[in-house]
Image (cartoon, grey):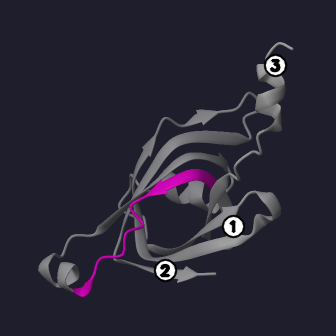
Amino acid sequence: MPFNQERKMRDIPRQPIYRFVVSIDGEKVSFNSVSGLNIPDDSEISLSNEALEITFHDGLLSNNNPLYQWLNHSSTDKVEKKDILVTLIKEAGGQLIASWSVINALPTKLSSPTADKNGNDIFVDEVSMIADSITMVAH
């Protein structure tokens, strides 16, 4: 009997995909991954006055979403710091894994924004921010 690779691949259970949901001003935006959610210990904080850097990767925003509006104003002097909540969820069933509270975040970079053909959604490669502090809550 010949080896059927297609059948074998189909029989392998699919690993759950984790997603990050960013909540700002009551609205939510999904990203595939996030880097920089490190929580420095007290000695690191006292040795450095530098802001914490966080980068969100592969996101989908609507053009009327508060995060998009906030990012659009980041090139002006009128941008304000905001507190945001980052939540890691398991795709299957939407189970919460962990959450991070990001205090006094400020957008610093928006990479490769591309609008969809209908013009309602904007795909972004990266959104970078700096923040004053991060705290984590396991669920």
x then y, percent, for residue 119 = 72, 35
Label 1: how many Cα within 10 Å (few below 14, some 14–19, many 20+): few
Where is residue 103? Give x, y as percent. Answer: 43, 78
Rounded to the nearest whole Å, what is the CA distance between mark 3 and mark 2? 46 Å
Residue 17, position as x, y percentages in the image = 68, 51
Local packing at callout 2 (Cα closer than 10 Å; few below 14, some 14-19, many 20+) is: some
Which circle, 2 or 1, is nearer the viewer?
A: 2
Q: Residues within 10 Å of mark 3 (few under 14, many from 20)?
A: few
The amino acid type of the residue labelled 1 equals Glu
The alpha-carbon separation of the residues under discs 2 and 1 comes to: 20 Å
Q: Reading the chain from its start, which is encountered first: label 2 or label 1? A: 1
Q: Is residue 65 above or below residue 39?
A: above
- Helix, strand or loop under label 2: strand
Mark 3 — residue?
4
Residue at coordinates 38% horizontally, 56% vertically from top-left? Answer: 76
- The residue segment tinted magenta is 30-42
Q: Can residue 73 be seen in this snapshot?
A: no
Contact (Cβ within 8 Å) of mark 2 with mark 1: no
Residue 41 drawn above or below residue 28: below
- Residue 84 in magenta? no
Task: Give the residue at mark 2.
Answer: 136
Depth check, mark 3 against mark 2: the one in front is: 3
Horizontal and vertical percent position of residue 93: 82, 64
Q: Is residue 46 visible?
A: yes
Q: Are marks 3 and 2 in contact (CB under 8 Å)?
A: no
Residue at (49%, 56%) from the top-left corner? 34
Q: Given the image, on which type of amino acid does mark 3 rest? A: Asn
Q: Amino acid at mark 2?
A: Met
Q: Disc 1 on helix, strand or loop? A: strand
Which comes sooner in the sequence, label 3 or label 2? Answer: 3
Q: Which residue is mark 1?
A: 27
The quarter holding residue 54 reads: bottom left
